[in-house]
Image: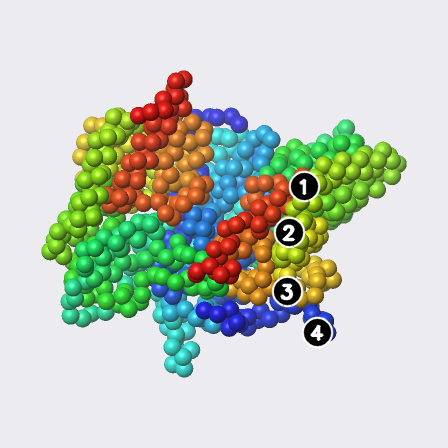
Amino acid sequence: MTTVNMTAKSATQNACKLCNPLGACLAFRGIERCVPFLHGSQGCATYIRRYLISHFKEPIDIASSNFNEETAVFGGSHNLKLGLKNVTQQYKPDVIGIATTCLSETIGDDVPMILREYETLMGSSAPLPIMIFASTPSYQGSHMEGFHAAVRSAVKTLAEAGPKKNLINLFSGMISPADIRYMKDIMTDFGVPFVLLPDYSQTLDGGPWAEYHRIPPGGTPTSAIASTGCASASIEFGSTLESHKSAAGYLEEKFGVTRHHLPLPIGIKASDRFFAVLEKLTEKPMPARYEDERRRLVDAYADGHKYVFGQKTILYGEEDLVISLAAFLREIGVVPVLCASGGKSGLMKKRLMELVPDLDELGIKVREGVDFVDIENETEELRPDFLMGNSKGFTMSKKSELPLIRIGFPVHDRFGGQRLHHLGYRGTQELFDRIVNTVIEQRQNASSIGYTYM
Amino acid sequence: MDTQNISLLEGREKQVYEKKQGADQIDIACDTTSLSGSVSQRACVFCGSRVVLYPVADAIHIVHGPIGCAAYTWDIRGAVSSGPELHRLSFSTDLQEMDVIYGGEKKLYRSLIELIDQYQPNAAFIYSTCIIGLIGDDIEAVCKKVAKEKGIPVMPVHSEGFKGTKKDGYKAACTALMKLIGTGSTEGISKYSINILGEFNLAGEAWIIREYYEKMGIEVVATMTGDGRIEAIKRSHGAALNVVQCSGSMTSLAKEMEEKYGIPYIRVSYFGFEDMSKSLYDVAALFPDRPEIMEKAKEIVRDEIRQYYPEMQKFKSALTGKKAAIYVGGAFKTFSLIKALRTIGMSVVLAGSQTGNKDDYSRLKEMCDEGTVIVDDSNPVELSKFILEKEADLLIGGVKERPIAFKLGVGFCDHNHERKIPLAGFVGMYNFAKEVYESVMSPVWQFAPRKGGLS
């Protein structure tokens, strides 16, 4: 087709974001014995399931209240109650994580009220599942807002006051199951009791089954979430995540649990910062295993530095991921010429400046609220050496003949996205190796000699 | 959690049937909306429309609503194009809160104008999503205005997600297509001509089918909608016959074309040697004044089967006695699948669909063996229960069913819109058998709990 070099600005073309309820469903999967439930059309649940399955390669059951025309006219109360009853009967969950959609939000369903009515209706004959509700209209924000809304709501619903305990809360945000497992290892190795929420490391990356599990094993237990109110501190990842939208923010305000707000620990400096907080909170030194990992990483930086210095990349994806990756790339001499996100917190540049103070001098562009056509146009102008982001940039990478280093979510066109590490020294090591190898592979393929020895 | 205790949801009993000697002959309840709170494998009205129209490659497809519906359907289908690829782009009006309050018409208008200027498409399809049905945007008016200004057809597709089931989405898509059909010139169309309906060119399947018909000396006017082009659709009323596959989505269009333009239609399936051959013979039989068409059809069938027969025997000897479960979108597909599986020695222990109708299910009952379970609008819990109980070695379904099979240690074949390997035609049957063979016979299942591995 004709390529006119202009972009329609009213429409979003090839979106670089997903909708609000998807994030909520993902977060709900990280609560033990919880079924995500979408209050809206059948399609929302099905599309979101399908989207998540392609990345995680696990069965993902999301219930729906199955709106029809009558529901839309007379309100969703009846369908929601019937749906809750049916899910309870068939899944026997401990928790139902209810998220709204554009449909139920637009007709103005008062979900908390409907839930109260449902509880009264069901009486005290049998214990009802705990109901956690997140308002996630798809016409606001992106999947990240939905994710954080669900986590905050879980804590709001379950956290209890009590005497302070030797306990750390870790709200690690939207990270891979492999990264969650790594975070748990770190906390365990520090020997500190902790609650990590949401923990979908097993529910979305588990083993084979002898029989179908209506709800897969794993997830943060509700009793653990209840105890977050008594923790000595919270650590929360996510540069643009504001206190009034976050779980740790709620706990600080309500129960005085100190919130340690950190960028996602990617790169040596950010990981050091994370470990320093842990050392301070636990009053213990970094376990030897991580000292080793860090030393190996510093050594690898030295071994690989010449391949990557001065390389230019375009980074895209969720704002928090992009911010942390940009800071890491500056540690190794790569210039992220464009830091782009479909998210629109209004904070991206400010937070990036804190980690990359010479952002403007380096000519790094920061763009919020963009789509892939915007990024593609920038690619033509900025001429990067490679791209970094999720699978949705593949079309662009093919068109511009640039390698794509796949990270984050979704990884739909490669195997093992759920097992990618990004965080801490280990994740950074993996990322660094992949970046260096991408550059080497490019050179090797482009060379008429084809060096076989380094 | 043991499977024995899985009970069917209240209100679902009538959608499940097991064929047994002496059992009550109940009619399977279908054509209903899904039960609230069940985890249906179905999608929505929008999904139905999007699937049908998606392969029209020289039109832009704009999803009017918040971002999700467009994001989740961006380039997810395996429908390929021999030319323009506008269908692989995802356009959304990405409605925000203010648009929901004040209406999205202006944003839709601006989006349309800008996108048409940018991409110069031959037409545009505008899909309404759930909230458009609530905020009351007059998308008909916007479409008319833009069509007039830009001089291309701009079709509204009334696909608000909650207004029915996927089937209503098919209907909405056919309504949009009907607006195009009849607006082009039929000059020069042969009287030995057909339209191929309900073929979406997944992994190039329409090309395979088209080639067979063209070899027979038949002109293919339009494929709807695989590798679809606006011009071809506009003149498709000049064809002598409509050949309809995937009856669920396109029969209503064929009926409308019959009423309005007097074009007869036949239902076919391109899946499996038996049905594929029949679909060539059935078409040839309708052109009796040119016997060479039938001659050619026979020749194609002979040559093709001869080519694949030896390999197929190899697959058959390995797969004989293995059991399959089928859960697909349309019930029509299951008929062919049952026959195809029989040709490679496999029996079917579960057959179900998301959107089958009464006739489909009674035909299924006739076709199936004793003990086969038949389900309408099923869910993961039920599917797993039957797969394990019936000891299936293979599940045939779509992406949402795939992880269920793999978790339970059962082979899987993707027979949905997202497949990457053509399964239609004679070569498609070979591909299917090969895929089934590779999945069922894989040594990896030895570690699955149901084969004695650790869970």
Residue A59 screen position, x and y as percent: 46, 56
Q: Quadrant location of the C terminus of chain B?
A: bottom left
Tell me how far mark 4 sits from mark 2, CA to CA: 33 Å
| Position of B239 relative to B349 (above/below) | above
| Left or right: A325 in relation to A282 | right
Q: Earlier in the sequence, mark 4 or mark 2?
A: 4
Residue at left 78%, top 38%? B302
Label annotation for residue B319: 2
| Left or right: B189 in relation to A349 | right
| Residue A9 visible in the shown view | no
Q: Which residue is mark 3?
A: B373
Tell me how far mark 3 sits from mark 1, CA to CA: 31 Å
Q: Nearer the viewer, residue B149 or A316?
A: A316
Tell me how far mark 4 sits from mark 3, CA to CA: 14 Å
Q: Which residue is mark 4?
A: B24
Question: Is disc 4 in the same subunit as disc 2?
Answer: yes
Tell me how far mark 1 sits from mark 2, CA to CA: 13 Å
Label annotation for residue B311: 1
The mark lying in front, picked from 4 and 3, is 3
Q: Earlier in the sequence, mark 3 or mark 1?
A: 1
- Helix, strand or loop for disc 1: helix
Q: Which chain's residue wears label 2? A: B
Tell me how far mark 2 sits from mark 3, CA to CA: 21 Å
Residue B348 screen position, x and y as percent: 65, 58
- Helix, strand or loop for disc 2: helix
Q: Nearer the viewer, residue B453 or A373?
A: B453
